[in-house]
Image (tube, helix red, strand yellow):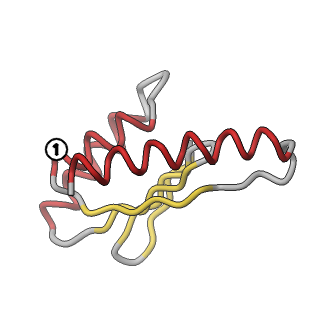
Amino acid sequence: MILEKAGGQILIECPNTIFHLYIKSEQDLSKIETFMNNIRTIERLGLNDIYTWCNRQGILYDTAFNYHKETSFWKNIKAYVRYSRQKMKYQSCCS
């Protein structure tokens, strides 16, 4: 998992998903910094955990699928299907 800071947003890169967390205020920035410090100590963090945390904390986010060229086409298709299902699940329950 890779964490990057860009102007007004935080990028969290997971194996097949990129989360864009948007910072609206100093309070959001504080929440995100605390979250980032905590996830560095966790051995295994699932995408569901990130989706759930963002929704509970009221952090605006968007996701994008991360296609890996070194992975076979079929594995990428399977990963995309899982990504799409999760995205639909969290958009419908938390919109």
Check the image and report above or below for 65 versus 9.
above
> Residue 7 appears at what percent x and percent y?
40, 78
* Image point (39%, 63%), residue name: 62
* Image point (18%, 60%), residue name: 28
Check the image and report above or below for 84 versus 43.
below
> Residue 45 appears at what percent x and percent y?
44, 29
> Residue 9 appears at what percent x and percent y?
37, 69
Q: Is residue 14 left or right of residue 9?
A: right
* Image point (33%, 61%), residue name: 61
Tell me the kind of residue under disc 1.
Answer: Arg
Q: Is residue 73 left or right of residue 29?
A: right
Farthest residue, direction left:
27
> Residue 66 appears at what percent x and percent y?
64, 55
Residue nearer the viewer, 24 or 63: 63
Which residue is disc 1 drawn over? 56
Q: Classify the position of the N terminus by image quarter.
A: top right
Number of marks drawn: 1
Farthest residue, direction top:
43
Quick one: SS at disc 1? helix
Q: Classify the position of the C terminus by image quarter.
A: bottom left
Q: Is residue 4 left or right of residue 72?
A: left
* Image point (31%, 54%), residue name: 91
Residue nearer the viewer, 39 or 72: 72
Farthest residue, direction bottom:
7
Mark 1 crowdedness (10 Å alpha carbons): few <14, some 14-19, many ≥20: few
